């Protein structure tokens, strides 16, 4: 169990380029779809918690999934798994950088990865949207709250945390009366 | 000597505790701490370190901590900086995980979480919108084609994440190798 935990989070660490949300589609694929250690609802709760607490999403996920599967040792093993590729690759890149002071090929690879990351994050977003909007019947109220959230973020420049809290409170009150 | 490691640990711990919302928030804070306050790193070098942190896979905050830790105290420094960065989220999420089941079965909290699903959807779509705009603004045919192809591969064909990442990395490597002689020639012309 611990070995599989380590391998899954090693993969998540090794393939999430571009920081932040890039880890989300990988966690979905490895943990929800493949190993089924989390349900889609738990996965969505995990992203909610990760957005509301400090620290990288990958580490938050590692701790959450690790604790669930194998307690505190699980949390530690999963976290070590997701930072190990970083240590190796950052080590290699910084060696190359101090040696040659040139990162142009790496930058080229990186620029080609950005479109992939955007498409993958959108894929994860759509699956959470489906869960929220179409899980049992069409949830018009939930869709309205999501649109409210988008307006707050884009038009009123709310921070993600403030947006989550506003959506959570408004939605909770709304769901109580539906 | 001891003091240096202590400062490294406490700085990364402090920064990680107060950065909500992922890697891009921590970068300016790290810059303020290590360049301006402690004077451990030069301004220009910090820019390069950030570029490396963003190029490597994994969380940007952790990659940046590794680079700064390594510079200050070699491998022990890097490990200490990682520890400082991961400890706050591990502690907070562990405590939440312990109470998650009770938490989830509470009527009000479960509604609150259900409502926040809509919030998560909004944040993800907002991020995707911003990132796509940035990509479209490059007006690079390669980037825009890749975006379209990746969308089809992911949304309609459901290809695995790792395959899409590796495919794009390969395209990026080939295109920069093809462009490399051109860059060199241009640089040569400019010099001449």
Image (tube, coloured by chain):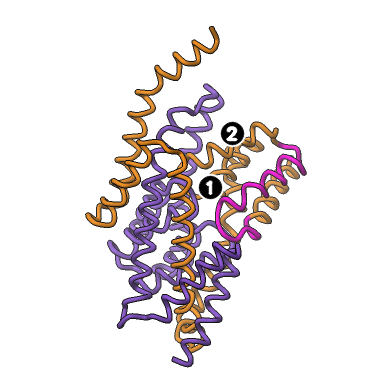
Q: Which residue is mark 1?
A: B60
Task: Indicate left or right for A100 with A178 as reference.
Answer: right
Q: Residue at x 69, y 50 (%)?
A: B11
**Letter of the chain shown orange in the rendering:** B
B87 or A107, nearer to the observer:
A107
Most common secondary structure along the magenta stretch = helix
Say few, some or many: other residues with alpha carbon within 10 Å of mark 2 (under 14 / 14 to 19 / 20 or more). some
Magenta region: which residues? B16-40
Residue B181 % position (x, y): 40, 17
Q: Residue furthest top?
A: B192
Residue B78 % position (x, y): 59, 42
- Quadrant into which the N terminus of chain A falls: bottom left
Q: Is residue A84 visible?
A: no
**Letter of the chain shown purple in the rendering:** A
In the rendered structure, find residue B48 and report the number of the disc placed on it: 2
Q: Residue furthest left?
A: B157
A26 or B99, nearer to the observer:
A26
Q: Residue at x 50, y 62 (%)?
A: A60
Q: Is residue B58 visible?
A: yes
Whichever of labels 2 and 1 marks the residue nearer the N terminus, that label is 2
Residue A109 % position (x, y): 40, 35
Residue B158 % position (x, y): 25, 56
- Quadrant into which the C terminus of chain A falls: bottom left
Q: Residue at x 53, y 41 (%)?
A: B53
Residues behind callouts 2 and 1 on a single chain: yes
Q: Chain ID for label 1?
A: B
């Amino acid at each position: 169990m611990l070995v599989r935990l380590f391998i899954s989070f090693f993969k998540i660490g090794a393939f999430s380029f571009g920081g932040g949300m890039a880890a989300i589609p990988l966690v979905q694929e490895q943990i929800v779809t493949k190993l089924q250690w989390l349900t889609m609802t738990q996965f969505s709760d995990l992203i909610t918690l990760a957005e509301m607490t400090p620290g990288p999403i990958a580490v938050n996920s590692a701790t959450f999934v690790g604790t669930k599967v194998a307690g505190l040792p699980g949390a530690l093993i999963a976290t070590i798994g997701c930072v190990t590729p970083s240590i190796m690759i950052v080590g290699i890149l910084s060696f190359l950088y101090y040696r040659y002071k040139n990162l142009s090929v790496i930058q080229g690879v990186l620029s080609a990865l950005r479109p992939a990351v955007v498409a993958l994050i959108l894929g994860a977003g759509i699956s959470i949207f489906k869960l929220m909007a179409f899980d049992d019947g069409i949830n018009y109220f939930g869709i309205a709250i999501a649109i409210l959230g988008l307006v707050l973020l884009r038009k009123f420049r709310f921070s993600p945390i403030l947006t989550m809290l506003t959506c959570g409170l408004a939605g909770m009150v709304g769901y109580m009366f539906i | 000597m001891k003091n240096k490691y202590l400062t490294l640990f406490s700085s990364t711990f402090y920064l990680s505790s107060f950065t909500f919302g992922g890697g891009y928030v921590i970068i300016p804070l790290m810059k303020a701490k290590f360049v301006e306050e402690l004077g451990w790193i030069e301004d220009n070098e910090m820019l390069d370190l950030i570029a490396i942190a963003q190029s490597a896979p994994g969380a940007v905050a952790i990659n940046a901590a590794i680079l700064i830790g390594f510079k200050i105290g070699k491998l022990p420094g890097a490990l200490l900086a990682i520890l400082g960065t991961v400890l706050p989220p591990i502690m907070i999420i562990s405590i939440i995980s312990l109470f998650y089941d009770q938490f989830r079965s509470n009527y009000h909290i479960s509604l609150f979480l259900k409502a926040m699903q809509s919030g998560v959807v909004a944040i993800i779509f907002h991020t995707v919108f911003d990132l796509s705009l940035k990509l479209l603004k490059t007006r690079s045919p390669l980037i825009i084609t890749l975006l379209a192809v990746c969308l089809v591969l992911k949304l309609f064909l459901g290809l695995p994440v790792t395959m899409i990442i590796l495919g794009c990395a390969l395209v990026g490597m080939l295109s920069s190798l093809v462009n490399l002689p051109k860059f060199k020639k241009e640089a040569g012309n400019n010099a001449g």
